[in-house]
Amino acid sequence: MKEKTNEKITTRDVDFAKWYTDVCKVADLVDYSSVKGSMIIRPYGYAIWENIVAILDKKFKETGHVNVQMPMFIPESLFNIEKEHVEGFAPEVAWVTRGGKEELEEKMIVRPTSEVLFCDHFKKIIKSYRDLPLLYNQWCTIVRWEKETRPFLRSREILWQEGHTMHATKEEAMEETLRMLNVYKDLQENYLALPVIVGKKTEKEKFAGAEASYTIEAMMYDGIALQNGTSHYFGDGFAKAFHIQFLNKDNELETPYQTSWGVTTRMIGSIIMVHGDDRGLVLPPRIAPVKVAVIPIGDVDSTVEEITQQLKEKEISFYVDKTEKSPGYKFAEAEVKGYPIRLEIGKRDLENGEVTLVRRDTLEKEKVSVADCVASIEELLENIQKNLFERAKKRRDSMIYEATTYPEFLKITGEKNGFVKTKWCGNQQCEDKIKEDTTYKSRCIIGETTTGTCVCCGEKAQYEIYWGKQY
């Protein structure tokens, strides 16, 4: 079916950035606020976030984590304890210098992340190996003073989740780092219908203060990368800086090993940019706040009640549009909101004992009997979820390229957006040169190699790696 456009939404293939902003606004996901660089997440946008929170929070608790709440302010002296961490975040820090009418004795920052707060707490409560592992998570907001902002993708105030854990051994800490990375991968692929590449960040791109950072990389419709989650192994660096120690089973003092991991509302941006179209939002059923938009046409209340009661019993979320608007307007509204299924219940179809189901991903229509309606909806929701993932994966894979020489790499990056897979020597000079020559940055290392040469310098390669532009 030829795709129609919503006149309030810029055509995606003409101006992708404008299209994205239009969808965020027209679908009632966000609004701009009087606070420069910060967005208002409207009820529908927040409902998507609530679904993500519910899924992740359940997974965290199933893996033994508990939720805590840390202060939002960090004293300067506390923040300065871990030097590398400070240097990494300094450009984005928001400072508080006054309290009421008085100058503060010590400046404080509004947390950009909470490693130092957790460490300050951990040193007070970790005494013995019996206290480990310590598996904490926090749902909160952070502040990073971004110069350029965009709804969901970059904001000065960010809704997110941050896990912080302590372990008796480095092996346990590394296992935790990768376990939580896989939790994120499961969320991306099985709920958000986003195919992702999982790998390790380069030394240059790793989190400030970490020994190793691992990442979930998604590709947007326009071929630009979005980092959708990270998990960090800190080793014992923070623990040593904060003098955190515990008595082992032999009654000897040891230093524990630490991890942190987090995702943000940025994932909502990736859902929009991967699945959306010129009609508006397209939501995967497993994350959609409303799975079925019910559109009554005429006096069909009894059938609406019959079907919605069955939807309730099956715990399938729905919305009945009883507004005094034309059916065409209601159809367009359901499309811009990205409801996975539109259920049209009209008097003419009911004469034949039928209703119409319209799937948002392909816009295909199907007439089904009233008796089979809910069973058809259940099956269709699973088909839509699967199709969105497969469609996104097919598009992503079509924009993954390989290069073995630098001229080949320059040709690909000069003509196309996407991921470019190469071999790399591991030298930051090559990483910097690639960024300077092409604006492509390292996305993630996917493995070590014993064969081939670096795409940039021609020396012996150490790694296989993906490069790409980023949001």
Image (tube, rainbow, N blue to C red):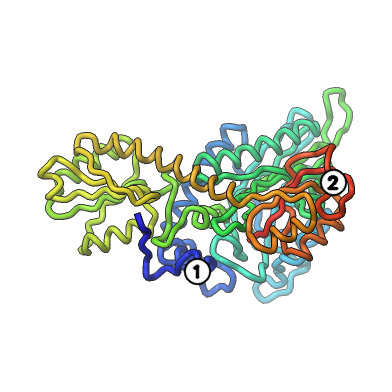
Instruction: Decide if residue 303 is on the left or right side of residue 221.
Output: left
- Asked if residue 268 is positioned above or below residue 286 in the image, the reply reads below
Residue identifier under label 1? 14
Instruction: Decide if residue 371 is on the left or right side of residue 179.
Output: left
State the quadrant of the N terminus: bottom left
- Asked if residue 106 is positioned above or below residue 266 in the image, the reply reads below
Position of residue 16 measured from the top left corner of the image (x, y, whole percent): 52, 65
Rendered residue at 17%/42% (across/down): 354
State the quadrant of the C terminus: bottom right
Between 424 and 26, the one nearer to me in the picture: 424
Position of residue 366 measured from the top left corner of the image (x, y, whole percent): 27, 44
Rendered residue at 29%/34% (across/down): 375
Asked if one can make out residue 417 in the rendered structure from this viewpoint, the answer is: yes
Residue identifier under label 2? 453
Is label 2 in a helix, a strand or a loop? loop
Between 44 and 94, the one nearer to me in the picture: 44
Query: Which amino acid is tagged 1?
Result: Val
Q: Report the number of numbered marks.
A: 2
